[in-house]
Structures are given as structure tokens and as C-alpha cells.
Image: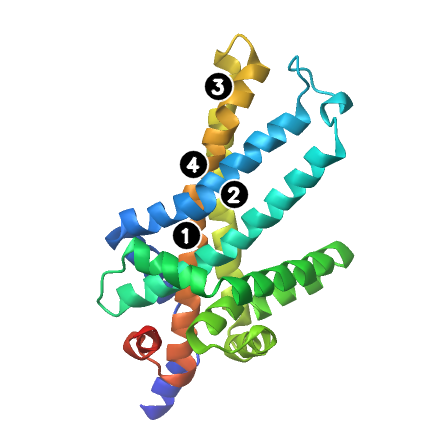
Amino acid sequence: MATIAETRRQTLDIGAVVRGTFAPLGRNPATFFGLSFLLAGLPRALLSWMQMGLGFGPAGAFGAAAISTPGKVLAFFVVGLGVWALGGVLQAAMIYGVVEDLNGRRPTLGACLSTGLRFALPVIAISWLFGFAVGCGLVLLIVPGLMLMTRWAVSIPAEVIERTGVFRAFARSRDLVRGSRWAIFALLVALAIAAFAVQMTFGALLGGVMMANPNPLAGIRASAPIIGALAGTFIGPVGAAGVASIYVELRTLKEGAEPASLAAVFD
């Protein structure tokens, strides 16, 4: 019997990860989706609005003349980095909220937001290093990028919960995912597919606006920021909660840590 129990402890419970992803969202929709609207929806709406300004000329015609000044391009790039950074803050805030929920406490939007902002600098550094390394790996041979993405999947939760420091967070993530990489890779792919499906749904809505509007380009410019806000609001919490749930399950699997012990770091 001890051998069977030990075998079970070495296997990541994918069902528990899925439940840990969606159950907290269902119990706290206003908090988590409100948080995502602030940190993902609104920034993506701004980015979509700026993209329309760069991609369409004054008369609504697509063309190179639309990209009129280097300043606009630079501003778009800066806002894009800001959106990426806020995505990291959202992850930190969601990690706090998910751990609180799994511990039987009701997270508030204010507490989640303050926790996300408290860890903003290290989380932003981790997210940028993560994105740069994984992006380079994907560009070069694809497989190295996927391997790094899986190995460092819980680097941000490691920083938020354990205060590892930026570089130690990557090593800590590597240690936690060892032995469960294929399961985690499958979960990350599932989350990516879900995000893609949501994006395609809202893209179809944009296509519907184009077809219904007598001036399709004007319809795109008017609706793209709204659809960007909706897509960001719905995609953000699922991905962040999924990563938080993977981290909690890995800590339980490897170290027997309970949500109460994880939540204690925020007291």
C-alpha cells in the first residue's frame, strides 16, 4: 500500500489542476474578472486603439502612410511592453487570490491588486526574461523554446510565494516541474488552445461588425478596442489561475504543502 501511495504522490493530478483553475474563478468572478479588466482588458483596448491608428490612414485606407511618425511607433512599442508588464502583475495578483481561495478565504480586488503591485518589479523582470529566452528558443528551433516554457512555468508563483529573487525563481521552477514536465506541457498547451479559442470567438465578432457595417474599416476601428478589452478580460484570469494552480499542486506533490501554509506568507 505504501508503494501505491508513493506512486500516486509522484504523479501530477491534472484533474486537480483543472479544478484549481476554474473553481476559484467561479467562486470569485467579480474579483478576478474585475482585476483582469483593469490589468489586461483596458491595456489591450488601448493597444488595439493605437494599432488601428498605425495600421489605417486618415481616410481609413490601409497603407504605409498610416505609420506617419517614429514617435507613434515608439509609443506603440512602449505601450506593448507595458501591457506585457501588467500581465505579470496580473499573474502575481491572481496567485495571491487563488491561494487565498483554496485556503477557504474570499480574496478581495483591493488585496489582490495591492499584492500584484507589491511584486511588480521582480515579476516584470521575470516575465521579460522568460519571454525573451522562450522567444529566442522558439525562433531558433521551436523545441528549446517549448522546453524553457515548461521548465520555467511556475517561476512567477515561486517569486510571489517564496520570495526567491528573480534568478532563483527560474531554478526553483525547474526543480518543481522536474518529473511532471509532460503533464505541465499538456496543461500549458490546453490553456493556449483555450486562449486561442476565446481570441477567435472575439475575432469572429469583429468579422461580424465588418460585414454589418457599410464602412467596414470604420467598424473595425470602432470595435477593435472593445473586442480587445473583452478578450483580455476573459483570457487573463484563466491563464494566471492555471499557472497558480499548477504551482499549488506541484508544492503539494513534492513537499506536501497545503494552501494554508502557502497563504501564511501573506499574513
> Tag 4: Cα neighbours inside 10 Å, few (<14), some, or many (≥20)?
many
The answer for how far apart the CA atoms under marks 4 and 1 are is: 13 Å
Residue 81 x/y as whole percent: 61, 49
Amino acid marked by disc 1: Val
Q: Secondary structure at mark 3?
A: helix
Quadrant of the drawing holding the C terminus: bottom left
Q: Is residue 142 visible?
A: no
Residue for point 51% across, 61% down: 186
Amino acid marked by disc 3: Val
User: Relative to residue 142, is residue 104 depicted above or below?
Assistant: below
Q: Which residue is mark 3?
A: 209
- Give the mark nearest the N terminus, 3 or 1: 3
Q: Nearer the viewer, residue 153 or 57?
A: 57
- Give the mark nearest the N terminus, 3 or 2: 2
Q: Nearer the viewer, residue 231 or 16?
A: 231
- Give the mark nearest the N terminus, 4 or 2: 2
Foreground disc of the pair 3, 2: 3
Q: Give the number of the disc on residue 238.
A: 1
Contact, mark 3 vs mark 1 (Cβ under 8 Å)? no
Foreground disc of the pair 4, 1: 4
Q: Is residue 10 visible?
A: yes
Residue 211 x/y as whole percent: 52, 14
Q: Which residue is mark 4?
A: 230
User: Relative to residue 102, is residue 81 depicted above or below?
Assistant: above
Q: Which residue is mark 2?
A: 196
Residue for point 53% across, 55% down: 189
Quadrant of the drawing holding the N terminus: bottom left
